[in-house]
Amino acid sequence: MILVRARNADAFEALYDGYHRLVYGVALRILGDVPAAEDITQAVFLKLWSSPDSFRSGNFPAWLARVARNRALDMLRSKAFRSESELPEAAPESDSLEDVAFAHIDAAKVRGALALLPQEQREPIELGFFGGVTHDEIARRSGIPLGTIKTRIRSGLRKLRNALDGAVTA
Amino acid sequence: MSAHDSHDAMLDDVAVYALGAMSPEDAARVREHIATCAECRAEYEALRPAAGALAYSVEACATGDNGPQVSELLKPRIMREVRSGMAPARQASARPAFVWPAYLVAAACIAIALFSTISNIAVNGQLKTAQTELDGIRIASTANARALDAERTTIADLTSADAKRYPTPQGAVVARGSKIYLAMHDMPALPKDHVYQAWTLPKGSKAMAPSVTFVPDTHGGAVLALPQDARLTTAVAISVEPDGGSKAPTTKPIAVVALN
């Protein structure tokens, strides 16, 4: 990132090569639309190039994934992309604290850990993370009590944490 | 509901907050609680990486059939914009100072050599073509020329007999007129994601003000000008700070010099 801040295009290209699949994958999962996911990927990386100081510290790929998720959720909520009737009642909060992530993480490892979760835990977690809906909305849509949804999310995240257990890196 | 049950419900809320699936109002409530509750803070810190890891589950594939593929056209599209310089210049309050690299000097030398060559070409009647080429070179080298001008000024100031030099363990702070320079050498390697940051103490103030951040070259050397006015500054310090700089020093300065 130091080289990108110094306007080094080669360094930026290396960053793109390393992380564009993560950005694109998040955007595509949230939006389900290839051109829109490409637009998000392009916007995220060009924003990184034009404002490299927007990443201050913490885990870079975790930060980049959060930026991609926020951008994709913004697009998901925009009237241009979906009709207003499909919008969630309240936009989920995305915190801005320093990002942390597991060291040595990869897609296969996370997919494997997710597959181990019972469906009743995996579904609200994926809906909350990729669907852009709040826990209240998940409970309303599923007809399951709010407290049960929250407990399932917590239990699922703890199992995920244990399955991915390893060093956490900032 | 007992106090234990109530707090257990709060821990559930913390998990939803870590997932990022809360309304802004609920999130503000949980965030406020986390700031004062060690148990909930620990739960949040334990679950947050797990929530963040979800993004990796959908990482796309570059090639092959195992998952979504990224269009090969996307990278050229982005890099074209990057390399064409269409992306606006970044803005930062504590941006890294410009350290004149060798390639700019080399580029300027090439430009000067081309200029001389083109002058000779004019003698044998090819001036018009050469002039067109020169115009392009002039445009391209404008930034280089500005950098060279600044470098010449720096060299003149640093070597001037009337410059005031304030030694530090890794070099010197040099003041001449309104200018302040850092001329550093053998600076220790920085920890990962950290930079050096200069600080200045304005006259009449008791608090250090942030100046530029910088990263030394591979030999630990750095020569840079601070934007502050030496006549209005009573001290200069250097500390190691997180990448991007800080608003106030977060580590003990490695050098502090008083200007007089």
Image (cartoon, coloured by chain):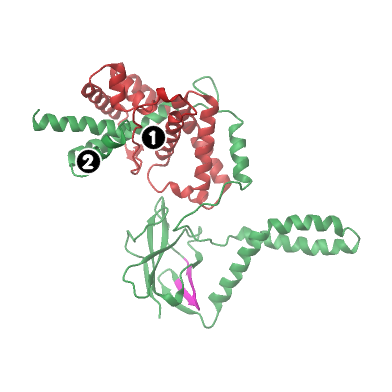
Chain colours: A red, B green
Looking at the rendered structure, the secondary structure element under dot 1 is loop
Residue at x 12% of width, y 29% of height: B5
Percent x, y of residue B42: 22, 39
Numbered circle sitting on residue A104: 1
What secondary structure do most residues of the magenta stretch adopt? strand
Q: Does residue A72 lie above or below B245 as drawn?
A: above
- Where does the C terminus of chain B fall, quadrant-wise? bottom left
**Region rendered in magenta:** B172-185
Residue A78 visible in this rendered orientation of the protein: yes
Horizontally, is B182 left or right of B155 in the view? left
Which quadrant: the N terminus of chain B? top left
Query: Residue B86 got which mark?
Result: none
Rendered residue at 53%/75% (across/down): B158
Name which residue lies at 22% across and 20% down: A145
Q: Is residue B212 above or below residue B181?
A: above
Please state which amino acid type lies under the numbered disc 2. Answer: Ile
